[in-house]
Amino acid sequence: MIYKPLEEVPKFIAGDETRLRELLHPKNDNLDLPYSLAHASIPPGTKSLPHTLKGEEVYYILEGKGTVSIDGKVQEIKKGDTFVVPGEAEQFVENSSETGELVFLCIVSPPWSEDTEEIL
């Protein structure tokens, strides 16, 4: 069994400036998974830097509202929404709130790593 209280998972800032906690990752958890799972957040009034990932990414919005831009197409997002970013697509997520964080889960396949992310 693997059990991780969120507050005990270390935070770090990814290359796109998203605040991340790697909940499950094959390199950290001795698991044979074809994906990684991260808890992410973006502060009010800010956005992630435009970037691409080699693999696909699934987002599930836990809190807040904002927009996502995928290859120039913009979509409003809010709590409860799910969307998929195709591999190699140029993307960024923006928190349109002035008071609350935009919080979401990210599933990335193949597992996220700095060398699979290109900041534009």
Image (spheres, rainbow, N blue to C red):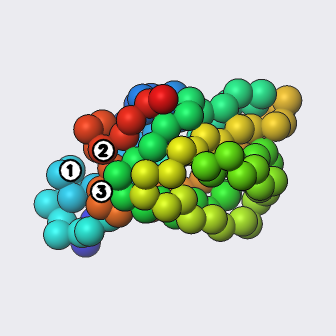
Question: Which is more N-terminal, label 3 or label 2?
Answer: 3
Find residue 7 and report its horizontal and vertical position in percent. 47, 43
Residue located beneath label 2 in the image: 116
User: Given the image, on which type of amino acid does mark 2 rest?
Assistant: Thr
User: Given the image, on which type of amino acid does mark 3 rest?
Assistant: Pro
Q: Residue at x 45, y 43 (%)?
A: 52
Find residue 10 and report its horizontal and vertical position in percent. 37, 37
Residue located beneath label 3 in the image: 111
* Nearer to us in this view, 76 or 89: 89
Marks 2/3 in contact by CB < 8 Å: the verdict is: no
* Nearer to us in this view, 84 or 43: 84
Label 1: few (<14), some or many (≥20) within 10 Å?
few
Label 3: few (<14), some or many (≥20) within 10 Å?
many
Does 120 sit left or right of 42 as displayed? left
User: Given the image, on which type of amino acid does mark 1 rest?
Assistant: Asn
Does 4 sit left or right of 84 as displayed? left
Residue located beneath label 1 in the image: 28
Identity of the residue furthest to the right in this view: 98
Q: Residue at x 26, y 68 (%)?
A: 34
Image quarter in which the N terminus is found: bottom left
Marks 3/1 in contact by CB < 8 Å: the verdict is: no
